[in-house]
Amino acid sequence: MKTIARMALKNGMVIGEDVYNYQNDLIYPKDTAVDEYVIARLARHSIMCVSIKEDIDYATTHFEKIRLSTEFKCFEAAYNDCMPVYRKIMTDFAEQGIPVRMSSLMELYVKISSCARNGEQLLDFLYNMLPSEDDMTHAHCLNSALIAGVFGTWLGLSKEDIFLLIQCGFFYDIGKLKLPQELLWKPGKLDELEFTRLKTHTMLGFNLLKNQRLNEHVVRAALMHHERCDGSGYPSRLKKDQIDIFAKYIAVIDAYEAMTSARTYRQSLNPFQVIANFERDGYVKYDGAILRPILSHIASAQLGLTVRLSNDVEAEIIKINPGRLSRPVLKAGDQVIDLAMERDLDIAAIY
């Protein structure tokens, strides 16, 4: 809601709060539609200001409210201002070898991230962004750098290591700028030849970065971010401690960003779907010491929100199950639903 002068009222506006005169008599209840008669009566009672409803007051879901909030609009404006600058910096480097000034990238990071009150809100904001098709590769890395700051904080990293992780986020997928867009963002499943070519982006990125004045962790993150702790990754099928620690961080960030970012050809996954995907085999492929606290933070951030279940029942999240983070305890009216015990039910949407 916002408060405006009576003189600024227009037909069709809706009063957001009860209006009383100076004798404390109710003049109009909230939800009254404004017309000329209403305005005239307010004038007779010398009412100078009135609260009226805005679009956000009609939003029903958590993410609708975020999209309509003033804070998100500020974030979106800052993000859209920074994207062309980031795209030019990285494209000039990948195509012409023009060195990147890290201070320039960090200025972009600060400008965007400072629009969010905390890490949870920043992730919610990113969840609501939809990049253009031309910007999807750049948005993937810019988003990953922003997520890196959040996850690094949650993991209790030092300021120096958080700064380094953000750098890794900016650069780790730069090898994709050497591959065609139609391959990177093909809507359907890649065939074997296409997937083989896609996997070259790790080596392409390594080759772009190896002779630059960058921290060695940044270079290794580009090369190793698709390696997995069980040896199932690429390009070298490394295992556990063979993988650079910052590459392990980026592996989680990369997977999270891919699952939560909307694409022109599919919806983004909701946080509990993301957690469920990680729980399915993540503790084998990813470093559990990194993954567990991140997933715990994501799950805990959903407490108090409303979900719609696969049977169309709506319920409030009242407790997180530590052993099954993707399956919280819910309350629907007087009924308590423990999704860890109700295997036939799933969270279809978060409100």
Image (spheres, rainbow, N blue to C red):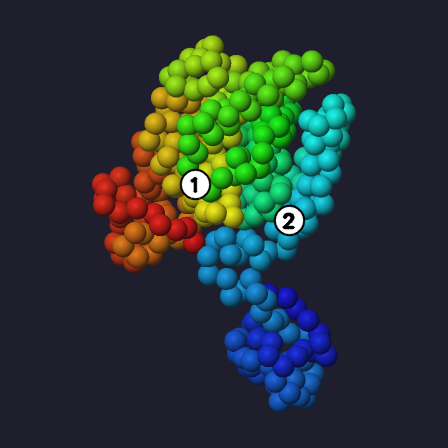
| Residue at position x 43%, y 43% in the image | 269
Quadrant location of the N terminus in the rendered image: bottom right
| SS assignment at label 2 | helix
Relative depth, front residue between 290 and 261:
261
- The x, y position of residue 25, in whole percent, is 57, 83
List the residue tagged with mark 2. 76
- The x, y position of residue 128, in whole percent, is 54, 48
| Residue at position x 37%, y 17% in the image | 230
| Alpha carbons under labels 2 and 1: distance apart | 29 Å
Relative depth, front residue between 239 and 47:
239
* Left/right of residue 140 with respect to residue 284 in the rendered view: right
| Residue at position x 54%, y 79% in the image | 32
Q: Residues within 10 Å of mark 2 (few under 14, many from 20)?
A: some
Kind of residue sitting beneath label 1: Gly
| Residue at position x 59%, y 45% in the image | 133
Kind of residue sitting beneath label 2: Glu
Name the N-terminal-most of marks 2 and 1.
2
Q: Compared to 29, does 315 lie above or below?
A: above
Quadrant in the picture for residue 239: top left
Quadrant location of the C terminus in the rendered image: bottom left
List the residue tagged with mark 1. 188
